[in-house]
Image (tube, rainbow, N blue to C red):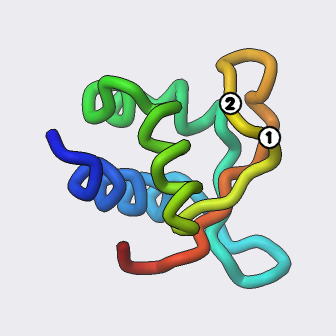
Amino acid sequence: MNVDHEIKLLVQEIKRLGSPNADGNISVKFGILFADDRCANLFEALVGTLKAAKKRKIVQYTGEILLQGVHNDVDVVLLVDDA
């Protein structure tokens, strides 16, 4: 799979699992994304896809890289509605 396609899938999954935050952007906790069965089947490397999406300013989150367990409560915020 190419990165552009994976980022489009990531945007869809954030919309499916997330909810609007105070700024009106859709937000989801990393732990929810990571634990979701559908996401586990879609993404070989969820963390890598998130990192690529962050670099393209499609999502925003605190820190460089997210690790399961340690960063479960970190908000992944969707900045671009249609990637």
The residue lying at 46 percent from left, 79 percent from top is 81
Q: From what the image shows, is residue 43 above or below residue 27? A: above
Kind of residue sitting beneath label 2: Leu
Outermost residue on the left side: it is 1
Whether label 2 touches label 1, CB < 8 Å:
yes
Q: Position of residue 52 (x, y in %)?
A: 47, 48
Q: Position of residue 43 (x, y in %)?
A: 32, 32
Task: Determine the image quadrant of residue 71.
Answer: top right
Q: Nearer the viewer, residue 80 or 13?
A: 80
Question: Which residue matches tag 2?
Answer: 66
The residue lying at 30 percent from left, 54 percent from top is 9
Q: From what the image shows, is residue 69 above or below residue 3? A: above
Q: Which mark is residue 27?
A: none
Kind of residue sitting beneath label 1: Gly
Q: Which structural element holds mark 1?
A: loop
Question: Which residue matches tag 1?
Answer: 63
Label 1: few (<14), some (14–19) or many (≥20) C-alpha neighbours in 10 Å: few
